[in-house]
Image (cartoon, rainbow, N blue to C red):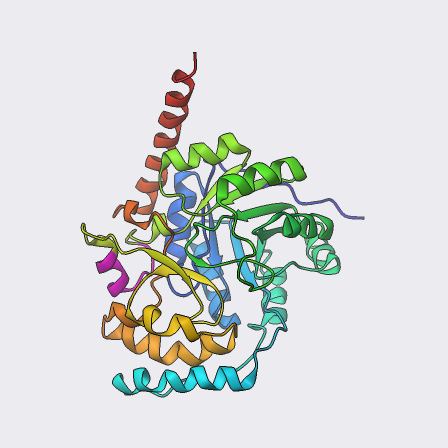
Amino acid sequence: MHTLPDFPRFPLPIIQAPLAGGSSTPQLTAAVTRAGGFGFLAAGYKMPDAVRADIDQLRSLDVDSFGLNLFLTSTHGCDPAVLQRYIDSLRADAARYGVQLGAAVHDDDALEAKLELAIDARVPVLSFTFGCPSHALVERLHAHAIAVWVTVTDLEEVEQAAEAGADALILQGIEAGGHRGSFRDRDGEGELGVLSLTRLAARACDLPLIAAGGLMDGAGIAAVLVAGARAAQLGTAFLRCPEAGTSDAQRALLADPTRHAPTQLTRAFTGRRARGIVNDFMRRHEPDAPSAYPELHHVTAPLRAAARAAKQSDDINLWAGQAYALAQERPAFELTRALAEDARTALDQARSALP
């Protein structure tokens, strides 16, 4: 038998989300940690050597308490004919940028190599998205004193993760930006709001709960803490920080004071439901986009890279939560401290509202 990892200690109940796809940087995680929060690095979409370099760089910034997020890719396959029709519909977009579409590859994002890397690097916390680690995998990580956090979106997933031996649950509400962390990519599943999910999960299990989804300010943080969460996880709120790796095109859109474009769940870019700011690519392709992840992620990667380089926001995935208009352009240390102070104020105001 081995001792189960403790929930990490950090002064402020604020967690910086992994932000896979380029926005995550060691500098962002370090700044949030120095402010008293807890930060995640993203392993998704990166080669193992690049993940190790991020870990080493973070530790060179004197940060030892952090998390690393991994993807658990499902074995679900898409009808090849349906997938091919969708790929063909993208060729004109790729031609406009003078690039070839990528190959429709189904892979596991080098999961085993990244697990071995995490064990060798003594990563304190591993979080999982898109699936639930097996009990055997949780035991394997516990044997190396690695805490296991699992992203869940409904009560069925809460129960499955608890039974697998998870140390904490990340409750992702439907408001969240980026990919849905659901174990299955199905319409109509995992669509609870963050407050509803937090209250239901608090009744269903006694694990530490981390609430995520549409949380942008102190009032939102206060709300989920009162609802039963141990901490709040924020992603979109950090996209305008100078330490984040947010693309120039997305920064410009987030900085626009007239930004009122809605967000929407879409499979158009990656073949898996993800929330982003509605743009022309989503409007044209979402109706025909199949559930085909990670195949479509690989197919559209060259097109998205070319659009980012050209600063063309209409052809890139602008992942953002529903309340993205509240994002502030502030250094991450300053933002984290301000969020905590605003949460204290919100809690005081709530107390004063009751006789």
Tell me the quarter of the picture where residue 205 sits. Answer: top right
Q: Is residue 160 within the magenta segment?
A: no
Determine whether, in the image, residue 345 is placed left or right of residue 157.
Answer: left
Determine whether, in the image, residue 50 is placed left or right of residue 22.
Answer: right
Q: Residue at x 42, y 51 (%)?
A: 29
Q: Give the range drawn in magenta.
A: 243-253
**Residue 335, x across and y down, in percent:** 32, 41
Q: Which residue is drawn at 48% across and 86% down?
A: 84
Tell me the quarter of the picture where residue 256 sits. Answer: bottom left
Judged from this view, the residue extending furthest toward the left is 257
Residue 145 visible in rendering? no
**Residue 262, x across and y down, in percent:** 31, 55
Judged from this view, the residue extending furthest toward the top is 355
Q: Quick check: 350 above or below 9?
A: above
Residue 151 visible in rendering? yes
Q: Quick check: 90 above or below 246?
A: below
Q: How many labels does the image show?
A: 0
Q: Which of 113 and 174 is in front in this view?
A: 174
Q: Which of 255 and 314 is in front in this view?
A: 314
In the rendered view of the protein, which quadrant contains the C terminus?
A: top left
Q: Quick check: 207 above or below 110?
A: above
Determine whether, in the image, residue 347 is placed left or right of residue 3.
Answer: left
Q: Which residue is drawn at 71% across and 50% down?
A: 165
**Residue 226, x across and y down, in percent:** 50, 30
Q: Which residue is drawn at 38% across and 59% down?
A: 264
**Residue 174, x across and y down, in percent:** 47, 51
